[in-house]
Image (cartoon, grey):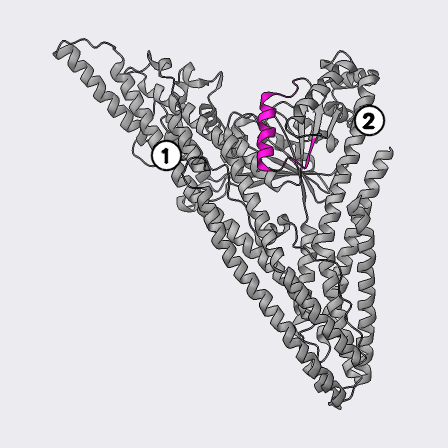
Amino acid sequence: MHNEDVKFSMTDMYDTLKDELLQISDDLSVLLSDAKSVPGMSNGSFGDWKKTCADIRRHISEEMMRVAVVGTIKSGKSTFVNSLFKGDYLKRGAGVVTSIVTRIRKGESLKAELRFKSYDEVNTDMEQAMVLFPSLNWRSGNDGFDIRQEDERAGLREAIENLSTDQLISNDTRSMNSVLLASYLEGYERVKETLFPEENSLEQADFQSRPLSVVRYEGDIFPEHRAFVADDALAVYLKDVQLEISSGNMEGNMEIADCQGSDSPNPLHLAMIQEYLLSAHFIIYVISSRTGLRQADIKFLSIIRKMGIIDNILFIINSDFNEHESPDDLNAVVKKIKAEISLIKPDPETYTLSALFNLFKSQENQNLSPKDRLRLSQWEKETAFSDFSDKETEHFESSFHHKLAKERYSLLLKNHLERLGVISSGAAYQIGLSRDILSKDVYGAGKIIKKIRHHQKKMNQIKSMTESVLDGTVKKMKHTLRADIDRFFDNRPGRVLGEVLKFAKDYNVPYYKYEESPDASNFGNTMYLVFQEFRQAVDTFMAEDINPEIIRFIREKEQNIREQLESVTGPYDVMAEDALAAYNKTMERFGIPPIQENQHRVDIPDMDLVKRTAGLKLPSLSAPMRYTAKIKTEAVMRFGFYSFIRLFKEKLLRRPTQNGKEGELLALKNGISRIKKETKSSVIFHFKDYRENIKFQYIFKLADALSDILRDILLDRFQAYITDLSKIVELIGEKQVDRADLTQILGEMETVSSGISQRINTLRTELMPSEEC
C-alpha cells in the first residue's frame, strides 16, 4: 500500500541518517586520536572531544522511543498491541490483582524476560494486606510475616477460608486484599519449585532481599510466559515483563507498553501507569466502540491533562463489528465519542478501526482457530465495516510513524549533530593552525604565539566567568527550588499534604451500616471492612488527585531549570563572539584563515537523555502508605472496655442501656479515630520522605546534570582557542624533526577534517526538512 511505502521510506531514511551520524562520530573520533598522536599536539582538547564522540555514539545507540498504550479494562489494549506486532503474543485478561506494564520491543527473535519481586517485597505486600485482618489468632509474636514458613502459610490459608461473604466481597467485587493473599499462597509452591531450587542453601539475611529471579522464554517456548501473566497466582509475583518480538512493522529502538487498565480497583496500579507515562514520548489511548467513552475514561483523561502530557496523544476507537447494525450506527457512536473527548482534549486525533479484525487478518494463514476463521470470513464480507477499518488503519499507521520519525529527527538534530559540528570545527582549526605555525621560522611562530596568548587570556576570562556564573546560578537555583519544593509539600490547606490530611480527616464512615454488626463475635471483622474501605479511598485520592499535581509540579520545575540555565549563557555568547572576531582579525594579519565557527545553536539535550545519562529516575509514585497492627490491638481493647461497662450497668447496676450497641459503636468510632491518627502519621512521614527524595535525589541532581552538560557544550567551543601551542613552536627549532613530513601529515588530517565538516553540513541539510515535515 501507499501508506506502507511512505512508512518504510521514512523508516529507511531515519536509519540511513542515523547510520551516517554514527559513522561521522566514529571517523571524527579516529581523526582526534590521530591528531593527539602527532608530536606537539598531545593536549587535552583532543582527548576531551574524543570522549564526547564516544558519549554521542552511546546515546544514539541507546535511544529508545517509548509509546504507552492505555485505556480502561476491556477496551482492547492488548489486542491492539498484538495487531501492531501481527501476532497473538500478549495474553489478555491478566487479572485485577496484577500491576504489570508489559513492555514490548522489536527483536531478532521471540524472547520474554520476566522479573520477579524479592521475598522482602512479597512479605511486605502480604503484611499490609493483613493489617486488621480478622482471624489472625494463629499468629504468635510480633515478627513480620514470612511466606517461606509452612505454619504461616497454613494459618493464613485457614483464616481466608473462614472469611464470611461480607469479608470476601467489597463494593460488589471480590475483596482486593483477600484475592492478593490467596494468590500469593496458591502460587508459592509453583514459583518456589520453578525459580528457587537453591533456597535452602542461602542464609535468611541474604535471601530476604535477594531478587527472586529473572526467567527467560525464548524461541519455541516463548508462549509459556503467558501462563505467568494470565494466572493471578503467578502474576502476583511478577515485577516486570519485557518481550522482544520479531514480527510486525514496528521499528527498532521503539518500546510499546501495554498498560494495566486505568480503572483497576487497585489505585496503586494507576500510580504505576502514571510512572510509565512520565517516560513515554507518545500515548495511544484505546476506547471501545461497544462501551463508548465511560466515566472511567473521562477521569483518566482528566488525570493525563493534569499531568501536563495530553498533547502527544492519539485515540484509537476500537470498533466491534458485531455491536453495530450499520456504518451509520458506528459513525454516530464515533461522533459522540469525539465530542466527549473534545471537552478534555480539543481537536483530538482519532482513528476508528477494529484491532481484532487487523489481528485476525495478520494471522489469516496461521494460528487461527476454525471459529476465528469463520468470524474473519464474515467480517470480510461486511465490506462497509472492513474497508472503513482498513482505511483508518492506513491513516493511523502513516500518522503514527510520521510523528515518531519527526520526533527522532528532532532529537538527532538537537542532541548530537550540532555538537559534532562544534568539535569538527575546533579540531579542524587546531590542525590547520598547527600546520601554519610549522611553516614559519622560530621568530615568526613566536610572534603568532604571543598574539594568540593575548587573546587566549581574554577567552580564559570569559570561560571562567561563564563557569562561575553557571555555578552561581545552580547554587541560587537550588536555594529557590528548595523553597518551592518545601512549600509545595507543606501541610497548609491547598497544598498536596494538606489536602491528603484534610481528605483523611473528613472521610465519612457510614456507621449506620454497622449498627447491627459490632458485637463480640464480629467486631474485628467490622474494623477490617471499615479500614479496607478507608485505605482504598485514601489511595484512590492519592492516585487520582494528588499524583497528577506532583507530576505537574515536577515537570514545571524541570522546565524552569532548563530555561534558567539556558538564559545565563546568552550574554557570554555575545562576549565570546566579540572576542573571537578580534582573534580572527589578528590571525588574518599573519595569513592564517579564521576558524569556521559553527553558526548553528547547540541546545541542551532533551530531558530524557539527560536523565538517562545521569541515571536519574523520579521516586516511585506507587509506594503505598504503611500501617501497623497496633490499630487493631487498641480498638479491640477499647471494645472490651465498653463491653465491660455495658455489662456492669446491665447486670450489676440493673440499668438498661438505651442503645444496646452504643458502647460497641463508640469503640468502632474510637477505632476509626485511631486509624485516622495513624494515617496522618503515615502520610506525613511518606510526604516528608518523598519531598527529600525529590529534592536531593532528583531535582538537585538534575540541575547539576544539566549544568554539567551545558558547561561541556560551552567548553567544546572554547577548547579550540585556549590550546597550548608552545610545543609546536619548540618543534620548529628541533633538527631531528622532519617539518616537511609533519606538515604533510597535518595537511592530510586537514583534508579528512574538511571532509567530515562537509558531511555534517550535508546531513544537517537532509535533517532540516525531515524535522519540519
x then y, percent, for residue 520? 27, 16
Q: Which residue is mark 1?
A: 680
Between residues 612 and 193, which one lies in front from this camera angle? 612
How would you rate the neighbour count of disc 2 (Cα within 10 Å): few for under 14, some for 14-19, many for 20 or more?
A: some
x then y, percent, for residue 744? 83, 79
x then y, percent, for residue 717? 69, 66
Toward which corner of the image does residue 536 lie, by quadrant? top left
Q: Amino acid at mark 2?
A: Lys
Residue 311 lies within the magenta run: yes
Between residues 284 and 718, which one lies in front from this camera angle? 718
Q: Is residue 538 above or below residue 481?
A: above
Q: Is residue 747 left or right of residue 682?
A: right
Q: Which residue is mark 2?
A: 391
- Which residue occupies 47% across, 17% down? 171
Number of numbered discs overlaid on the protein picture: 2
Between residues 643 and 559, which one lies in front from this camera angle? 559
x then y, percent, for residue 63? 68, 48
Identify the element where label 2 is drawn.
helix
Give the magenta part as a residue range: 291-314
- Which residue occupies 71% across, 60% down? 419
- Which residue occupies 65% across, 72% down? 459
Q: Is residue 137 left or right of residue 117?
A: left
Q: Is residue 565 left or right of residue 179?
A: right
Distance (Cα) linking label 2 and label 1: 55 Å
